[in-house]
Amino acid sequence: MKEKGSTTKKKSSHTKKKIKQTLLLLFFALFVLIGSAYFYYILVYRVNHEPEPTSTVTTSEPLYDLKNHRFFLALMPEVKAAAFNGRAAEIDYGTYVVPGLLSTETQVFEEKNSSAICTSMTPQGLAVTEDYLIVSAYCGSKTHNSVLYLIDKKSHEFIKEIVLRNKSHVGGLAYDPIHQNLWIAGMSRGIPQVNAISLAQLKEYSFQDKHEPIIYAQSYDLYSISRCSFLTYYDNSLYVGYYTKNTASVMEEYLITEDGTLATQIPADSLKRSDSITPIALPYDMRVITEQAQGVAFYKGKLIFSHSYGIFPSKLQIFNNSLQKLLEEDAVIKKMYFPEKLEQIYVDGDDLYVLFESAAYNYRASSALKIDRILKLNLETLLN
């Protein structure tokens, strides 16, 4: 009888063990299924399906409370101090709401003389002029034309959108204060480009008048670089770099001539917009840079690069602006971490303006800290 009871207990123990294993397998399968469904939703479905618009114009209201940004940035005290210390008297602590994250008036690509609402605009480039902040954005679902947002620098108010002629990623902007031209990163016919619009054009343009994209005053093909991912202006030169994930990249310098154009391989008279040939810009210099670069800025003998990739924390890397051509990790003099999805940075005086794409529709579901504002960081505080 003892042996029979022992056998029964063993069978019962074995049965319980099998039930536990089965439940664990079912739990694991359910976890994988839910995880797969979630990643499909955020990485595939949201990328290809825009939500229905709730507005017929470009929206300018924030998505999130500024108090939340200030609270969560306490995890990065260097960034919080540079962004908010001493700014209580400024509008929104010196921040600017990124327009168009909910709805942007633009047009469906190649549907001329029409208007449409895009709900997946993704901010990329940033430039600061004497009177404006300008942000570039592309359609996350690749349905609509890319745009620029014009923001009043003093009042922080959204002024208007400028519709561009294609669906380019528009990863960078640069403002030439001498000739008052805005340079825009682009791509045409599979070839990297830089395009220019005068400040006067930006002021006069109204999409609602004719529902037509703005016309570029200048366009140049760049044959010596793989992509035009980001750019900036410094000391009468245009600096163009491209984004790489895991390998070193390059940044090229293009000299701006006295009349505000770039040095090219063909005669200057072919730069007229009636000419069908796009001139090829010639680089003056080149530097090797580290991977995952999203933007660059110059400040008092320093080179500042923004880097980001996916859901990982972003970072700034600071180098001495010397004759050194290899800007590798061992040449970094300071590094600091930022919230994820940091895009272009721009220096204006002693302030560094920083832009994030984390609040865009395509990334809203996967971003831990969704920043829907341009932050203005005091560089003296940040670097010291």
Image (cartoon, rainbow, N blue to C red):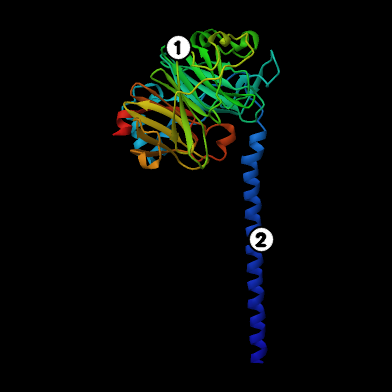
Which quarter of the figure is the N terminus placed in? Answer: bottom right
Residue drawn at point x = 66 percent, y = 57 percent:
29
Q: Judge whether 310 appears above or below 273 on screen.
A: below
Residue at numbered disc 2: 26
The amino acid on which the numbered mark 1 sits, given as a three-letter code, is: Gln
Q: Judge whether 15 appears above or below 268 on screen.
A: below
Q: Residue furthest left?
A: 384
Lower sequence index among marks 1 and 2: 2
Badge 2: residue crowd in 10 Å (few <14, some 14–19, many ≥20): few
Compared across the picture, whether 335 is left or right of 241 comes to left
* Label pair 1/2, CB-CB below 8 angstroms: no
Which quarter of the figure is the C terminus placed in? Answer: top left
Badge 1: residue crowd in 10 Å (few <14, some 14–19, many ≥20): some
Residue drawn at point x = 60 percent, y = 10 percent:
273
Residue at numbered disc 1: 180
How far apart, in angstroms, are the residues tagged by discs 1 and 2? 64 Å
Numbered disc in front, either 1 or 2: 1
Tag 1, which secondary structure? loop
Residue 249, given in percent of the width and then of the height, sits at 49, 36
The amino acid on which the numbered mark 2 sits, given as a three-letter code, is: Leu
Residue 38 picture quarter: top right
Residue 284, given in percent of the width and then of the height, sits at 45, 23
Residue 315 picture quarter: top left
Of residue 305 and residue 247, the one placed in the foreground of this image is: 247
Tag 2, which secondary structure? helix
Q: Is residue 65 visible?
A: no
Q: Is residue 192 visible?
A: yes
Residue 153, given in percent of the width and then of the height, sits at 42, 17
